[in-house]
Structures are given as C-alpha cells and as structure tokens.
C-alpha cells in the first residue's frame, strides 16, 4: 500500500485516506526530467504535460498559472500541476546572479489515470520540506 507523509493539508484533503488504499504497483513514474540553469532568461510562457517542481537557488522566480502568482526566493520551491498554462519570470539578485533547478514528473495510476490530478498541491513549498531538497 502507498504511504503518504502527513502534511498541513492531510487533515483537510479528503483524497489522502482513499489514496492510501491504492496498491503500490498501481502507481508508476512515467516521466522524470531534471534540469539546472545558472543564468536568467527572458520571461516565457509554456504548458507542459507533467508536473513541475522548481527550486530557486540564487535570485528569485515568479510563476503565474490558474489565477495564482507565486514568488520563490532562494531555497523555495514552486509547484505547477501538469497541463497548466504558465508564465515564468527570472529575477537576478543584486549581483546579477540567478540559478534554479527543477524536475518535471508525471505519475500515473493503473497506467492511465493522472495521479497528481487527484491531489491538492500547494503552489509553493517552504520550510523543512524545501530545505530537505536543498541539502540533497
């Protein structure tokens, strides 16, 4: 069976209890692509068929999607669900430096259902959860 780490949303997200009863072999990672960039680019718009987790390392990032605007300072992670049109802006620090790393992922359940679509994802991760990713 799947095991979920308790989060601030666990008590209010009704899907958590139901998803814990899903057999482990029902969940598959169909796609994973990490990336790193150490220079800012011009603002850009895109839509991807996978979930994006992007962590700012130097400078900041602003992402806009689904009427949400998230600003991510160094160490913070933003999440964008799959198939969401988004706009990303890179903002260098005072010394003109900027860097971020990210991972694009796509999980399915039973080979066809979009697993992340069943979850209520936060648009930004901060604190201990984000720090753990920084140290890895």
Image: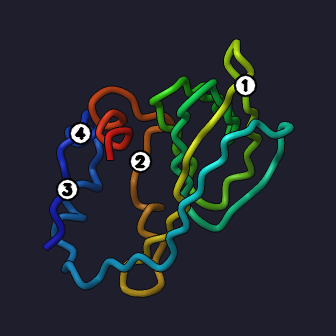
Q: Earlier in the sequence, mark 3 or mark 1?
A: 3
According to the picture, the residue beneath numbered tag 2 turns out to be 120
Q: Estimate the x, y position of residue 46 in percent, counting from the top left.
A: 78, 54
Q: Which residue is found at the position 47% from the left and 79% from the top?
A: 30
Decide if residue 8 is on the left or right side of residue 98.
left
Determine the CA span between mark 3 and mark 4.
Answer: 9 Å
User: Vertically, is 129 above or below 4?
Assistant: above
User: Vertically, is 70 above or below 87?
Assistant: above
Quadrant of res 23: bottom left
Asked whether disc 1 touches disc 4, contact meaning CB atoms under 8 Å apart, the reply is no
Decide if residue 132 is on the left or right side of residue 74.
left
According to the picture, the residue beneath numbered tag 3 turns out to be 4
Asked whether disc 3 touches disc 1, contact meaning CB atoms under 8 Å apart, the reply is no
Determine the CA span between mark 4 and mark 2.
Answer: 11 Å
Q: Quadrant of the N terminus?
A: bottom left
Q: Is label 3 or label 1 in front?
A: 1
According to the picture, the residue beneath numbered tag 4 turns out to be 7
Q: Estimate the x, y position of residue 101 in percent, counting from the top left.
A: 55, 47
Quadrant of res 119: bottom left
Q: Residues within 10 Å of mark 4 (few under 14, many from 20)?
A: few
According to the picture, the residue beneath numbered tag 1 turns out to be 91
Assign a secondary structure to mark 1.
Answer: strand
Q: Is label 1 or label 2 in front?
A: 1
Q: Earlier in the sequence, mark 1 or mark 4?
A: 4
Q: Which residue is found at the position 67% from the left and 41% from the top?
A: 38
Decide if residue 49 is on the left or right side of residue 73.
right
Assign a secondary structure to mark 2.
Answer: loop
């Amino acid at each position: 069976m799947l095991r979920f780490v308790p989060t601030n949303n666990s008590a209010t997200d009704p899907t958590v209890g139901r998803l814990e009863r899903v057999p482990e072999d029902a969940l598959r990672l169909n796609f994973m692509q990490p990336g790193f960039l150490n220079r800012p680019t011009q603002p850009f718009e895109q839509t991807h068929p996978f979930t994006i987790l992007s962590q700012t390392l130097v400078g900041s990032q602003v992402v806009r999607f689904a009427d949400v605007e998230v600003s991510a300072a160094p160490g913070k992670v933003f999440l964008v669900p799959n198939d969401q049109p988004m706009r990303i802006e890179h903002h260098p620090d005072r010394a003109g430096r900027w860097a971020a790393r990210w991972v694009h992922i796509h999980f399915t359940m039973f080979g066809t259902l979009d697993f992340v679509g069943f979850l209520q994802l936060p648009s930004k991760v901060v604190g201990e959860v984000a720090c753990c990713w920084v140290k890895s």
